[in-house]
Image (cartoon, rainbow, N blue to C red):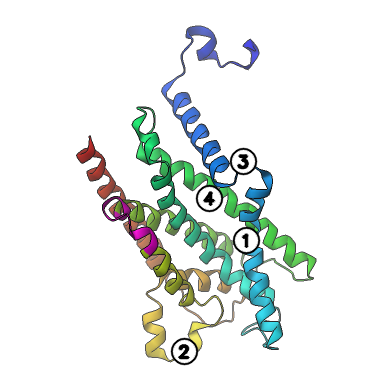
Amino acid sequence: MASGLTANEREGGRLSPLESYLHVLHALMLRDMRTRFGGTLWGYGVVVMWPCVHILMLIAIYSFQHMPAPVGNSVPLFFATGLVPVLIFQYVSREVMKATLANKPLTYYPQVKLFDLILARVLVEIVTGFLGLLVVVSVLVATGTDPRPVDNFLAVTAYLSSILLGIGIGVVNVAIVGFFPGWLVGYALFNIVMYLASGVIFLPSFLPEKVYYWFKFNPALQLSEWMRSAYYPNIGVQVDYLYVILFALTSLVFGLLILKHIVSKQS
């Protein structure tokens, strides 16, 4: 057993502040996964597989109606490039909010802060989302579709921006739900509207110019077009990369400021 101890534990029996924090974070992540997924690999697998189920449902609908992909020759690739960034953003932004509601009693322990609950859930969602991405890529390969983007850098930055936006909106949601617990339901309904207007199942650029102008204010739409532009460079869309990044960072800063006010008020 002694060989498994750190130097600090062997010498003084105490962990450093960083080690203690990492232990707390690790415990929160394990608790999060066990309580949410039933403590089984099957439960976790269902969540990882959900993006594939989502894509297969859309493919089935298009196949039943004999509809071609709006762009390119592959219906699965068209849906995957739109769905992956939007679902990553929505899952992170929603689950971060749910984490603080479900695990709020843990903050009564002096070692656990509200920010720890947020960070633990963010890390769990990043890992889950990446595993889901691997499954989607595997399904595309199995169906004979080449999942490699034309522009690798553009695809990676689109994926990372989805995570960043999800964290920013998620922190804002945590701040809002601290005052209005009913926002959990309200955001679920709002998410449906954002999803329908994100261009996952159609190309918003085909809409009339005046309508498309207002659709562009939806950051989820910008994410789907960002990812698709990495696969279809001739798609003819103009992605406002700065808008997405600033939207995410502004949301994050705004949410953290409100959370700081909430924490200081409760203490």
User: Badge 2: few (under 14), some or many (20 or more) residues near its Cα, within 10 Å?
Assistant: few
Left or right placement of residue 110 versus residue 148 in this view: left
Alpha-carbon distance for marks 1 and 3? 18 Å
Left or right placement of residue 186 versus residue 72 in this view: left
For the residues labelled 3 and 4, say whether their Cβ atoms are less than 8 Å apart.
no
Residue at 36% x, 81% y is 214
Q: Which residue is mark 2?
A: 207
Amino acid at pointer 3: Gly
Mark toward the start of the polypeptide (2 vs 4) = 4
Q: Tell me the quarter of the image containing the N terminus.
A: top right
Alpha-carbon distance for marks 1 and 2? 29 Å
Which dot marks residue 78?
none
Q: Which residue is mark 4?
A: 125
Most common secondary structure along the magenta stretch = helix
Give the farthest residue toward the top.
Answer: 11
From the image, state whether disc 1 or disc 4 is nearer to you.
1
Amino acid at pointer 1: Trp
Amino acid at pointer 4: Glu
Q: Is residue 209 above or below residue 99?
A: below
Which dot marks residue 39?
3
Which region of the structure is painted magenta?
176-185
Q: Which residue is mark 1?
A: 50
Label 1: element kind: helix
User: Badge 4: few (under 14), some or many (20 or more) residues near its Cα, within 10 Å?
Assistant: many
